[in-house]
Amino acid sequence: MAEMRIGKALNQALIDAMAEDETVILLGEDVAEAGGPFGVTRGLLEKFGPLRVRDTPISEASIASAGVGAALTGLKPVVEIMFMDFTTLAMDALVNQAAKARFMFGGQVSVPLVLRTPHGGGLSAGPQHSQCLEAWFAHIPGLKVVCPSCAADAYGLLRSAIADPDPVVFVENKALYARKDEVPDTLTAVPIGVARVARPGRDVTVVSYGAMVAVAETAAQELAETGIEVEIVDLRTIQPWDEGAVLTSLEKTHRLVILHEAVEAFGVGAEIAARMADIGFDELDAPIVRVGAPFMPVPFATGLEAVYRPDAQRVVAALRKVME
Amino acid sequence: MSKPATSRSDAAIDPDRLLALHGTMVLIRKVEERLSQLFADGEVPGFIHLSIGQEAIAAGVNSGLSDIDTVASTHRGHGHALAKGVPLDRFFAEIMGRDTGLCRGRGGSMHVADTSIGMLGANGIVGAGIPLAMGSALAHQTRKTGGIAVAFFGDGALAEGVLHETLNMASLWSLPLLFVCENNGWSEFSPTDRQFRANIVELASVFGIEGRTVDGDDLVAVTAATQEIVAAIRHGGGPYVLEAKTNRVRGHYEGDAQTYRTDGDRPDAADPIARSRAALLAAGLTEEAVAATESEAVVAVETAVEAARAAPPADVSAARNGVYTDAVRGAA
């Protein structure tokens, strides 16, 4: 075992994928000379050259569309959009073009595009640099959406996303880039669509993804002191999410809390709750509770942002509620 | 509509080649006239946008391309697809919603595609094909395929931001990309001079991209210009803008009452085809040879329509197939 930062794990995944397959290219603002705004693409220009690692102008709509066109012409582009908030400018490329090309052309072609983008608050980045918009993309048939919580998964899911024949929105939490995790000596691909049990427990299940998995862990430790054993299911993939893994955990604990940083209303948690209320109704000993951000933009000031972002105390409160 | 300032080319084109391109134009015309009828008769559902009067551009530009070259088209894209070489029977089958259609009935008129010959699709979003073609050109450059990409767009797309972004990127990276602006004077229901203050060729020049305007109703001019331009792009000359002035004979879509248009605005549909026919006769071809090519188009269209009618409708049992490449839960 060794320690690795999540940012480095992503960097290593890009290096390994590009070394293995010369059709993998990178496109994005400041990904080449500057090595990426968060350093994820550092050193890749030197390794793979300017044709495969391209700094683009600040033109999100056309960067993303170029990724689609390149994917339709034999490349596997990895496009970086500097903040998830900026994917709003690239929606035609993702929603109307990438997501639909395979279906609307009758299956004659796939679009092996990966769009990497960081979401999440906690850095006082303000209302236009902090949003978690993954539910938008999870709502679009044809897109896959993944969001790793740890270094090994960051590596493994990015490898799978690049190898995937279909468009994948790869969501990174920017508060996690610098976090160090234990990783196995040999990093391997992690399949898309398969959740993992991040912490086993018998009493109550928390389903989460990304940076909130660590928040769930903190809450679980607090409850463990009072004898409540929390099981944490890390979804890893949001679309297609691992319904079987969530149901299996629910069958064990009979109580379910769903946690994400994104706004609670109309979010990923709503989908999971609705589905479990349908196929897992007989297993439930308590109402399903969601923990997400309140229905508001992400504020700037530290104190205000804390009102927005779910923390361990809110998770603890939700867990106590379903344990009543 | 004012007639365009022409830059007619007198460049010699082999008469047999010209005859083949004239045949392509006539085929596009016959296909769209047939589609108009099928639409009126209820055999084609949805929306269709016809390019009647614009055939010389599709035929002329595609004459410079091979299967390795890629084309991104528009909602008015029947001509581009046919000139690129999509099979006529599968083309009609698609627009008539049949299982044998190019897209198995999932796309229809606005999404006709055949990626096996580089036809990356018509597109329902105005301007969307432009950055797609840019990405395709980027792939040609990166993979060193020797191919080029073509972005067809109408003057209605001139005010779309992605055009301006794409001009910039294509120039920065010297991409093998041909921008073809089919300027028919109309942006859906509005005259383009009320929507766009600049001129595409001048705009391109600001980005360091060469361009020229041709009479888009003159097959010889479009073909000669394209041959020269495509050769230059293929040899590393970077992007180029070709503005082809033409006319939109029909409405924005079939069934458009065109209340915004006066009778005096309506150009003669026969114009580009009459002109290519005259050019053929002037080049020494006989009336019989030209007429034979035109009759072939009519027969081909009727054969394809009958085949589509006989084909099974899009397979309802497979309606959800193809959302993803591999089976994914929630999708077939």
Image: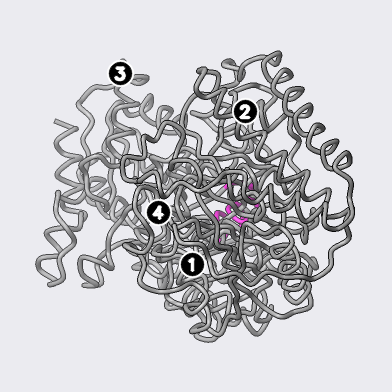
* Element at label 1: strand
Question: Disc 4 to disc 3, how far (Cα)?
Answer: 54 Å
Comparing B7 with B103, the one in front is: B7
Question: Disc 1 to disc 3, how far (Cα)?
Answer: 40 Å
Question: Which segment did they paint magenta?
Answer: A155-166
Comparing B192 with A233, the one in front is: B192
Instruction: Tell whether label 4 touches label 1 (CB within 8 Å).
Output: no
The residue tagged 4 is B187
Residue A125 position, x and y percent, is: 24, 72
The residue tagged 2 is B34
Residue at x 20% of width, y 47% of height: A315
* Element at label 3: helix
Question: Disc 1 to disc 4, how far (Cα)?
Answer: 33 Å
The image quadrant of residue A17 is bottom right
The residue tagged 3 is A281
Question: Disc 1 to disc 2, how far (Cα)?
Answer: 46 Å
Is A159 a magenta residue? yes
Question: Disc 1 residue type?
Answer: Glu
Residue B255 position, x and y percent, is: 42, 31
| Circle 1 or circle 2, nearest the eye | 2
Question: Disc 3 residue type?
Answer: Phe
Residue at x 58% of width, y 57% of height: B152
Q: Mark 2 or 4 closer to N-term?
A: 2
Question: Disc 3 to disc 2, how far (Cα)?
Answer: 56 Å
Q: Mark 1 or 3 closer to N-term?
A: 1
* Element at label 2: helix
Tell me if B295 is positioned left or right of A188 in this view.
Answer: right
The image quadrant of residue B174 is bottom right
A261 vs A110: above or below:
below
Whether residue A20 appears in this view of the structure is no
For the rendered model, the colour scheme is one colour
